[in-house]
Amino acid sequence: METQSLSAISNPDVRHDFVMVFDVTDGNPNGDPDNGGEPRQDPIDMRGMFNESLYIASGTALDAPQLAAIADAEKANGKDKSAVAKSARQLIFERFIDVRLFGAVLTQITKIGNGGQVTGAIQIDTARSVTPIEIRRDGITRCAGATEKDGLNQNMGAQFRVPYGLYTTMGTYSAALAKAQGNPISAEDLEKFWKALALHLELTPSTMRGRMILRDVLVYTHESKFGSARTEDLQAALSIKTDVESPRSIEDYTITIAETPKGVTMTRLRDVLV
């Protein structure tokens, strides 16, 4: 294992895979609105789950910017709808980092031509807990009324929490995909992504989510845009095991990391961010 620099893991011309390890204590990190807000859980193996919305919150409202991009594209391409759509799509790429990183559905551009769906250069899988999670239901009481006329209004309710869960997930930056789409993603974009990934839980605390800590991010940098090793092999290099029946902290687990394959260098994100 060899630690690189932030600039090395931000090279937009090669593939980067990354494994995230994080935990939650006494919180509901990703409640399921279709199941009464309960923490998401695989009904077969009882492992906790949550989707990429925890770490991807792309907040750009794109309808108005798309219309502006279309107007600018029409000035340069006239009434050629195909050329206008292609040019407008490229302008959206150039103007919004969240589109370059995570993609978007460009509905306004789709109305005039092909190219309205953009797949982001970075894709992150659904996270799963290492071991089955417990789900606790805590009763709560609302004492204040909704209006002044209501006065004291003691309505009973409930909130859910996971006493403890250790989760992992895998993500990929695909240089090949970015190039194929004409995505002008830069080293500066990737540096911003790594910094945001490292700090997002710390800077967005939530009582409902409980105490969430990003324990580790392992970045695997390949020698080429197509990669030098299989993604599943890199994910399997991280081994997390426990003999504790109901783990309650990360100290209840044994974590080991295997040597990286030839052509791949591993960097711990925390070692290159000061």
Image (spheres, helix red, strand yellow):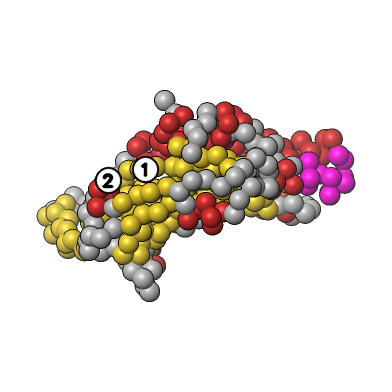
Q: Decide: is 53 above or below 40.
A: above
Q: How far across and down, in percent of the image, does residue 160 sit?
A: 25, 60
The amino acid at mark 1 is Leu
Q: Which residues are magenta?
A: 77-87
- In terms of image quadrants, where is residue 11? top right
Is residue 221 in view from this perspective? Answer: yes
Circles 1 and 2 in contact, beta carbons < 8 Å: no
Name the outermost residue toward the top: 274
Q: Residues within 10 Å of mark 2 (few under 14, many from 20)?
A: some
Q: Residues within 10 Å of mark 1 (few under 14, many from 20)?
A: some
In the displayed structure image, the side of residue 242 where residue 8 appears, left or right: right
Q: How far across and down, in percent of the image, does residue 216 sit?
A: 39, 42
Quarter of the C terminus within the rendering: top left
Name the outermost residue toward the bottom: 44
> In front here: 82 or 111?
82
Query: Callout 1: helix, strand or loop?
Result: strand
- Examine the structure image and report whether residue 84 is included in the region drawn in magenta: yes
Q: How far across and down, in percent of the image, does residue 112 sit?
A: 78, 52
Question: Residue drawn at (84%, 35%), measured in percent from left and top?
Answer: 76
The amino acid at mark 2 is Arg
Query: Callout 2: helix, strand or loop?
Result: strand
- Examine the structure image and report whether residue 73 is included in the region drawn in magenta: no
Q: Give the residue pinned by disc 1.
A: 214
Tag count: 2
Is residue 69 in view from this perspective? Answer: no
Q: Give the residue pinned by disc 2.
A: 211
Question: Residue drawn at (36%, 59%), measured in percent from left and top?
Answer: 130
